[in-house]
Amino acid sequence: YCRNGLGYAVRMADLDGQVPPEAPGAGLPKPTFMVASGATCDARYKFFQATARYLDVPIFTLEAPSPGLREAMMEGAHERHINFMVKEYKELAAFLENLTGKKMDWDKLVEAGEKNRELDAVWWETNELRQARPGPMHSRDFWSAMFGVMYKQADAKVMTSLYRDMYDEV
């Protein structure tokens, strides 16, 4: 994703923000802003940082605690991590409100979270099935299907239905 994404951003920058004419599927337009996170992968943070720089768009980096095992088990660590993430999400909301001029709808966020919780549960249950031997689903297939659960960009009901079908197949 890094080579393709950065290559696209560089090409778009060369064209003064225009979609490259050779882009498949009519290409992607220049984003209004980007939200980055280094959670689970340091390269993701740098990818978004570099892409935002090429595209000349504002970026917000959502930090996430990544403690070692010993630190994670310390008394009060869980509460500190929750407090830290609440602070990060409030700062993200302020960034987005300032950028878009729209007020954050916290009730809508809670509703989306509830819908995505079911999607996450089906993903978890499918992964649990993979403990059987012989394995009913190859890792290549499992991780190829991760995008719906990781990036939450589609309708949660549709994605949950697709993941249920995957579960039934496994």
Image (cartoon, helix red, strand yellow):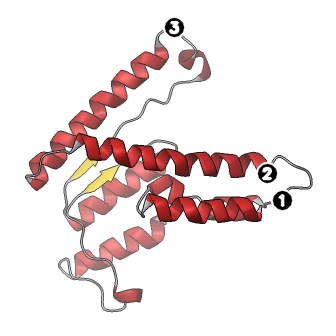
Q: Which residue is mark 2?
A: 130
N-term mark: 3 or 2: 3
Q: Residues within 10 Å of mark 2 (few under 14, many from 20)?
A: some
Amino acid on which disc 1 is placed:
Pro
Q: Which residue is mark 3?
A: 75
Would you place residue 153 above or below residue 66 in this image?
Answer: below
Amino acid on which disc 3 is placed:
Glu
Q: Quadrant of residue 137?
A: bottom right
Q: Quadrant of residue 52?
A: bottom left
Q: Looking at the rendered structure, which numbered label has been put on residue 101?
A: none
Residue at image point 46% right, 64% down: 2
Residue at image point 28% right, 47% down: 108
Residue at image point 29% right, 33% down: 88
Q: What SS does tag 2 mark?
A: loop
Would you place residue 20 above or below residue 154 in this image?
Answer: below
Q: Nearer the viewer, residue 75 or 109?
A: 109
Q: Nearer the viewer, residue 120 or 24?
A: 120
Q: What SS does tag 1 mark?
A: loop
Which one is in front in this view, the residue at disc 1 or the one at disc 3? Answer: 1
Quadrant of the rendering where the C terminus is positioned: bottom right
In whole angstroms, how far apart are the C-alphas of marks 3 and 2? 33 Å
Q: Residues within 10 Å of mark 3 (few under 14, many from 20)?
A: few
So how many labels did they put on this image? 3
**Disc 2 + disc 1, Cβ < 8 Å:** yes
Q: Which residue is mark 1?
A: 136
**Disc 3 + disc 2, Cβ < 8 Å:** no
N-term mark: 1 or 3: 3
- Residue 51 place in picture, x, y as percent: 32, 62
Q: Residues within 10 Å of mark 1 (few under 14, many from 20)?
A: few
